[in-house]
């Protein structure tokens, strides 16, 4: 790593120490950064700019950051606070609407309230809800009759009234909603918490069967147990190719909540063949943040080489580029084969599902291009 890149890495380490290791009372000096705009860009890429603003505010480090950068961060924080209050009301409303349906809420603002103390801001985009597949039609009707409408994440517009499920929603095991009045509170209702993995349905059933009840802001919410929240976060980070360092903050915060009761988590690691994935995460946290998650890590030369390359990519390019890394950490032979197929000959629905909000891909153009490349037309 170059010297100027080490400066940005030091900032990320300071944020980790402050928020994940509990180094709140220690004297933390924010180093001078020559290219402050690049710092904010890196923080944005890793979804850490809100945490950075909170850190700067609480450690009296404002003099290190020019006002033209602090002001936009402050504005973002105000927007976050407003959205947070809206979404908490949304959570309370939805919990009442589907109270008789087995469900759990997870990720996003739920993770923030469960694992980030003192209202430390964790970015979120929607409210994620897991239900059983057989309940989906009933839940659609309940939500549509109580102030929510179906939402098209590709066009960012309301969908015409419909209780059916299209092929993309079936593929993703997910239906999207927004509140009818303001269209600012978004819900994603899932019936498979990890639809990209063969064992997604099994994990979903286990989470629904063994959920906990959490209370925050005078709201009672069904949430996954800590060990399931951690397994989900490990696989969700892999599913999204480690785009953001926030994933590692989540994993460390959730792991800390397990305290001395890690037996169930270790059983899940073995059951779903996540040993290599967990080893990489432990190595990453130790190498980048100098923090031991669990005992001594023994890695061979091959692991060290692919892990180090992946870490460098994650920090500065936001995703590992070496296919060998994914082939090594994906759990089980079937998942490795699935990854290899998606890498060499991606499926239309797989691409469409991962384009994100507001991004569209035309099916005809996709398949025409696929045939052209295959036959070298």
Image: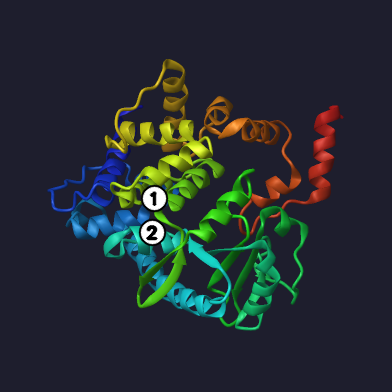
Q: Secondary structure at mark 2?
A: loop
Image coordinates for residue 257, horizontal then vertical, percent = 32, 52
- Residue at image position (47%, 61%) is 211
| Picture quarter with the N terminus | top left
Of residues 269 and 345, the one nearer the viewer is: 269
Tag nearer the camera, 2 or 1: 1
Contact between marks 2 and 1 (CB within 8 A): the answer is: yes
* Residue drawn at 54 percent across, 54 percent down: 206
Q: x, y (%) of residue 81?
A: 37, 70
Residue 87 located left or right of residue 293: right
Left or right position of 2 against 26: right
**Which residue is label 2 attached to?**
122
Report helix, strand or loop for mark 1: helix
Residue topped by disc 1: 250
Q: Earlier in the sequence, mark 2 or mark 1?
A: 2
Position of 172 with respect to 226 (left or right) is right
Q: Is residue 162 above or below residue 64?
A: below
- Neighbours of disc 1 within 10 Å: few (<14), some (14-19), many (20+): many
């Amino acid at each position: 790593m170059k010297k100027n890149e080490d400066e940005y890495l030091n900032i990320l380490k300071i944020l980790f120490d402050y928020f994940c290791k509990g180094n709140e009372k220690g004297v933390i000096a924010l180093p001078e950064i020559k290219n402050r705009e690049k710092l904010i860009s890196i923080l944005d890429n890793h979804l850490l700019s809100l945490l950075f603003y909170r850190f700067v505010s609480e450690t009296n480090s404002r003099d290190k950051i020019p006002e033209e950068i602090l002001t936009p961060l402050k504005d973002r924080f105000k927007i976050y606070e407003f959205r947070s209050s809206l979404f908490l009301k949304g959570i309370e409303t939805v919990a009442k609407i589907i109270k008789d349906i087995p469900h759990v809420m997870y990720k996003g603002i739920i993770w923030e309230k469960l694992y980030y103390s003192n209202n430390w801001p964790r970015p979120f985009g929607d409210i994620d809800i897991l239900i059983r597949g057989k309940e989906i039609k009933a839940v659609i009707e309940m939500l549509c009759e109580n102030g929510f409408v179906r939402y098209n994440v590709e066009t960012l517009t309301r969908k015409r009234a419909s209780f059916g499920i299209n092929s993309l929603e079936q593929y993703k095991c997910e239906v999207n909603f927004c509140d009818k009045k303001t269209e600012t509170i978004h819900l994603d209702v899932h019936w498979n918490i990890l639809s990209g993995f063969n064992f997604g349905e099994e994990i979903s059933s286990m989470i629904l069967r063994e959920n906990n009840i959490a209370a925050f802001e005078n709201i009672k919410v069904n949430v996954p147990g800590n060990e399931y929240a951690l397994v989900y976060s490990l696989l969700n980070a892999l599913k999204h190719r480690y785009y953001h360092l926030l994933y590692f903050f989540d994993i460390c915060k959730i792991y800390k909540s397990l305290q001395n009761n890690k037996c169930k988590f270790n059983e899940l690691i073995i059951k779903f063949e996540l040993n290599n994935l967990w080893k990489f995460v432990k190595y990453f946290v130790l190498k980048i943040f100098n923090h031991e998650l669990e005992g001594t890590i023994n890695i061979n030369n091959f692991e060290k080489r692919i892990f180090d390359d992946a870490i460098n990519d994650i920090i500065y390019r936001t995703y590992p580029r070496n296919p060998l890394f994914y082939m090594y950490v994906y759990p089980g032979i079937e998942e490795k084969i699935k990854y290899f197929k998606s890498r060499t000959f991606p499926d239309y629905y797989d691409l469409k599902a991962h384009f994100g909000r507001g991004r569209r891909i035309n099916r005809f153009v996709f398949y025409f291009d696929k045939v052209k490349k295959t036959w070298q037309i």
